């Protein structure tokens, strides 16, 4: 007789324990549930089994292999998509010909007498025998009524209390004759209880229910998971416990070290090579995984600790589950029902209240009081992606190992044989990490075009051409020389959309990375004309007429960044007189600190003034953004510079639309309208501005932070293109930069940040909408409340920090200040 073990479920109710591993691999007293099931089958003489897999199937295959270690022969049948309980077995039909077979769940703990169930099946000449069990709460199961002889009379799947007519439920254990599979359509979603069994019952086929006396627990919730551990320790389940019973109810695995001064009150289990120090206390129904460490004065009661977990001194854990490779530091306290995912860090003195769920790879800060779930969408390290890609401290948060996993996840989201660009800034850290990224991409069957050190605009341009599917650019985090950003690009050279980011995150969190076969290892190439092609296309598309005739003189500061690889040679072809500063790759200072930026801008202003240049610009170290200094050497702040460039573009184009974020002063609307152009307001996220710039009638876009999009050349932020465009505009307008600035009305806009806990951000925004009353509101991004006189305030919860941002603009500074104070007070009151 053969068996089919159903092992394809995701176990969504058991997350975060099943966030990165399939439910059948969850350990019960340090053995996966499915291993207990296979040992039960072996005990009853069934040594050939088909395992149906779907979710994280590789992990199950890797763990059990061919079954030799269990003395069994295992076959695996994978579902491309879930096919239902019957469709899954139909998928394994080729292994099930000629004799009855048993179907059993790989994620339910049981010791039901399968031999007696088989006897019952044969004595009654049944086509199908369903294993039944009497339970106290049948709401989560299918109810089945049988007559005195065991023949099935009626089915009801997952009833309400008003529909409960029996406490006899379907265990999901079936013995079947092979002809039953003829009733199941191949490749379709079919369920036994919902589709096949009712049809057999209607046709009068011999369908029987075997009411079992043994133990059965559907480990489908966190509560049932903990109770299953306790039931094994109490001896209520006939399963094997590896180890030695050193005293009644106290089981200890091989190589475990337990100090004589430790307090053990069974029943409990301590895994192989675990260590329990003096003064630690382990109480009833606790399970300690292999290689776990419990330090002195720690207290555990009804707690399940998975493998390789560190429990610090003076910690207190009650009725919780701690996932593998997690560190719980000294003095931390975890209460009843809390579930901690794998590879988390619970720092010292942190407190996790009842029923909290912490998803894998999270850090709970020292002293934090956590009373809401910490999942991948929320607070702290809630998500891989921030406003600048994936960011973190070099060799602390962003390591070569992390870079490999991220690049492997990215490769997995693309088709084999796709082409991806890689690039970096001038820093050594970016160079090191890029090598790791390149290795992971080629190992994932992705061809790599390594642009090496180039400005971000060049990386984006080369990614958007010649059949490239995407790119990864690595740069030092702006303002933080100790941190680095991994920027993932799509086929247009823009940052990945939120949807694509989520797809990558899902692959990353499940560690389902594609690996190429030896003959599929992809190629690495180094394009020789990436910079030259960019420069040629830029000069072809951007209008530089009039520059030579106007005898333009400009000063540019390359900031020691990758812009120095392009700008000097590019400007030599335009005909302007150019003085360049910091025209080198500066590995020691690969980013802008505020002090360095202000010092360089002051020096730039002095040079512009003394050399009587028309204006000056300073690029950021990757040449994506620029700051502008007028002919007098005065710095034009970024928000004002946006209006200057907008005025020049709109005046020359005489129409079209410009895309600007909703935080921009409404003076921009007056400037655009004066020249016959129209403003399209966008959300503040960079990808939203890029998305808007793809429209054919968009003639300009800018973010107010030194980033400009010139759609005639590129639909992404490009400081080099913006500078070349500005050079031509100023040359042709015959006005100085300061004159252009003076003709634009002054804006009266203020901003403020109000600290806001993540847990109350939603209620804060609700309070803002309520406080707006009858006033006009705009929800393009956050909530913008417009007053009758046209003044406005925008309240916007920050996506990456625990703050709420507020902008206010009025006809004068007093009005703006009054609005800012009013809405800051609304936010503060809503916080409670």
Image: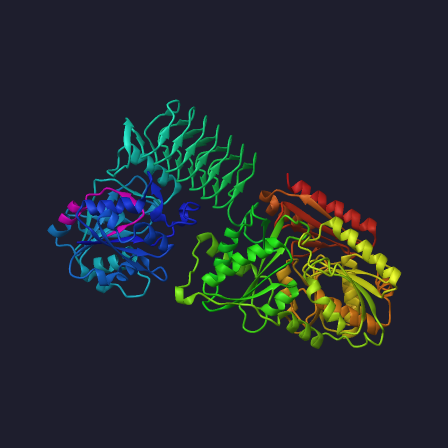
Q: Residue 340's spot in the image, x, y percent?
A: 46, 41
Colour scheme in use? rainbow
Q: Is residue 723 magenta?
A: no
Q: Residue 527's spot in the image, x, y percent?
A: 58, 70
Q: How many marks?
A: 0
The residue lying at 65 percent from left, 59 percent from top is 683
The residue lying at 70 percent from left, 69 percent from top is 710
Q: Quarter-wise, where is residue 323 in the image? A: top left
The quadrant of the rendering that contains the N terminus is bottom left
Nearest the eye: 322 or 416: 416
Q: Is residue 786 above or below residue 339?
A: below
Q: Is residue 155 above or below residue 255?
A: below
Q: Quarter-wise, where is residue 781 in the image? A: bottom right
Q: Quarter-wise, where is residue 720 in the image? A: bottom right
Q: Is residue 112 magenta?
A: yes
The quadrant of the rendering that contains the C terminus is top right
Q: Give left or right: position of 620 versus 387.
A: right
Residue at the outermost top position? 261
Q: Give left or right: position of 36 versus 566.
A: left
Q: Is residue 306 above or below residue 798?
A: above
The residue lying at 61 percent from left, 42 percent from top is 757
Q: Is residue 294 above or below residue 589?
A: above
Q: Residue 244's spot in the image, x, y percent?
A: 28, 31
Q: Residue 151's spot in the image, x, y percent?
A: 17, 51
Q: Give left or right: position of 432 versus 723.
A: left
Q: Which residues are magenta?
A: 103-119
């Amino acid at each position: 007789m053969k068996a089919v073990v159903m092992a394809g479920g995701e176990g969504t109710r058991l997350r975060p324990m099943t966030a990165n591993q399939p439910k059948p691999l969850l350990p019960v007293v340090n053995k996966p549930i499915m291993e207990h099931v296979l040992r039960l089958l072996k005990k009853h003489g069934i040594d050939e089994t088909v395992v149906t897999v779907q979710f994280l199937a590789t992990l199950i295959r890797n763990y059990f292999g061919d079954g030799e270690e269990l003395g069994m022969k295992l076959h695996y049948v994978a579902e491309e998509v879930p096919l239902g309980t019957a469709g899954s077995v139909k998928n394994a039909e080729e292994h099930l010909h000629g004799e009855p077979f048993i179907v059993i769940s790989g994620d339910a703990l049981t010791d039901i007498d399968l031999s007696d169930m088989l006897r019952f099946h044969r004595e009654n000449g049944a086509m199908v025998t369903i294993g039944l069990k009497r339970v106290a709460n049948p709401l989560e199961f299918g109810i089945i009524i049988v007559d005195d002889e065991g023949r099935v009379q009626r089915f009801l799947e997952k009833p309400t209390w008003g529909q409960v007519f029996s406490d006899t439920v379907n265990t999901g254990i079936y013995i079947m004759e092979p002809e039953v599979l003829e009733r199941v359509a191949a490749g379709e979603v079919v369920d036994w209880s919902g589709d096949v069994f009712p049809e057999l019952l209607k046709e009068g086929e011999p369908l029987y229910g075997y009411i079992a006396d043994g133990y059965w627990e559907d480990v489908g919730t966190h509560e049932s998971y903990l109770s299953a551990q306790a039931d094994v320790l109490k001896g209520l389940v006939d399963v094997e416990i590896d180890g030695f019973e050193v005293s009644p109810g106290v089981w200890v695995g091989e190589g475990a070290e337990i100090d004589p001064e430790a307090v053990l009150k069974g029943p409990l289990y301590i895994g192989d090579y675990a260590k329990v120090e003096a003064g630690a206390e382990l109480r009833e129904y606790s399970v300690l995984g292999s290689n776990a460490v419990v330090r002195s004065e720690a207290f555990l009661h009804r707690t399940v600790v998975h493998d390789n977990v560190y429990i610090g001194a003076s910690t207190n854990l009650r009725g919780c589950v701690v996932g593998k490779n997690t560190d719980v530091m000294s003095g931390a306290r975890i209460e009843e029902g809390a579930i901690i995912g794998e590879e988390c860090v619970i720092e010292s003195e942190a407190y996790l209240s009842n029923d909290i769920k912490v998803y894998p790879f999270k850090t709970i800060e020292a002293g934090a009081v956590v009373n809401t779930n910490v999942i991948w969408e929320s607070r702290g390290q809630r998500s891989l992606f921030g406003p600048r890609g994936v960011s973190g401290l070099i060799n602390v948060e962003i390591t070569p190992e992390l870079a490999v996993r991220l690049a492997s996840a990215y490769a997995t989201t693309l088709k084999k044989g796709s082409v991806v660009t890689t690039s970096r800034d001038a820093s050594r850290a970016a160079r090191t990490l890029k090598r790791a990224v390149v290795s992971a991409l080629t190992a994932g069957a992705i061809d790599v075009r390594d642009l090496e050190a180039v400005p971000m605009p060049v990386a984006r341009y080369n990614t958007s051409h010649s059949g490239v599917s995407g790119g990864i650019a690595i740069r030092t985090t702006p303002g933080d020389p100790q941190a680095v950003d991994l920027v993932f690009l799509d086929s247009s050279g823009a940052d990945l959309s939120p949807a694509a980011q989520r797809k990558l995150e899902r692959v990353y969190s499940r560690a389902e990375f594609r690996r190429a076969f030896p003959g599929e290892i992809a190629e690495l190439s180094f394009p020789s004309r990436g910079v030259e092609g960019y420069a040629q296309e830029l000069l072809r598309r951007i209008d530089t007429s009039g520059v030579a005739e106007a005898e333009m003189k400009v000063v540019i500061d390359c900031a020691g960044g990758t812009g120095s690889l392009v700008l000097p040679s590019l400007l030599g072809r335009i005909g302007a007189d150019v003085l360049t500063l910091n025209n080198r790759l500066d590995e020691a200072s690969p980013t802008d600190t505020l002090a360095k930026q202000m010092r360089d801008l002051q020096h730039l202003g002095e040079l512009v003034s003394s050399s009587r240049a028309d204006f000056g610009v300073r690029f950021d170290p990757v040449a994506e953004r620029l700051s502008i200094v007028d002919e007098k050497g005065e710095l034009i702040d970024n928000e004002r510079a946006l209006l200057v460039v907008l005025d020049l573009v709109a005046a020359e184009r005489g129409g079209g639309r410009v895309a600007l974020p909703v935080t921009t002063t409404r003076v921009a609307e007056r400037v655009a309208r004066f020249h016959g152009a129209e403003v399209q307001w966008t959300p503040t996220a960079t990808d939203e501005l890029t998305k808007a710039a793809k429209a054919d009638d968009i003639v300009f876009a800018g973010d107010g932070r030194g980033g400009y999009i010139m759609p005639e050349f590129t639909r992404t932020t490009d400081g080099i293109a913006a500078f070349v465009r500005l050079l031509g505009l100023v040359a042709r307008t015959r006005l100085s930069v300061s004159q252009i600035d003076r003709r634009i009305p002054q804006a009266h806009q203020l901003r403020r940040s109000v600290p806001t806990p993540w847990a109350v951000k939603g209620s804060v925004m609700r309070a803002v909408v309520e406080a707006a009353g009858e006033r006009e509101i705009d929800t393009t991004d956050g909530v913008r409340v417009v007053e009758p006189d046209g003044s406005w305030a925008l309240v916007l919860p920050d996506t990456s920090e625990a703050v709420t941002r507020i902008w206010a603009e009025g006809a004068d500074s007093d009005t703006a200040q009054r609005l800012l104070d009013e809405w800051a007070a609304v936010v503060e009151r809503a916080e409670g």
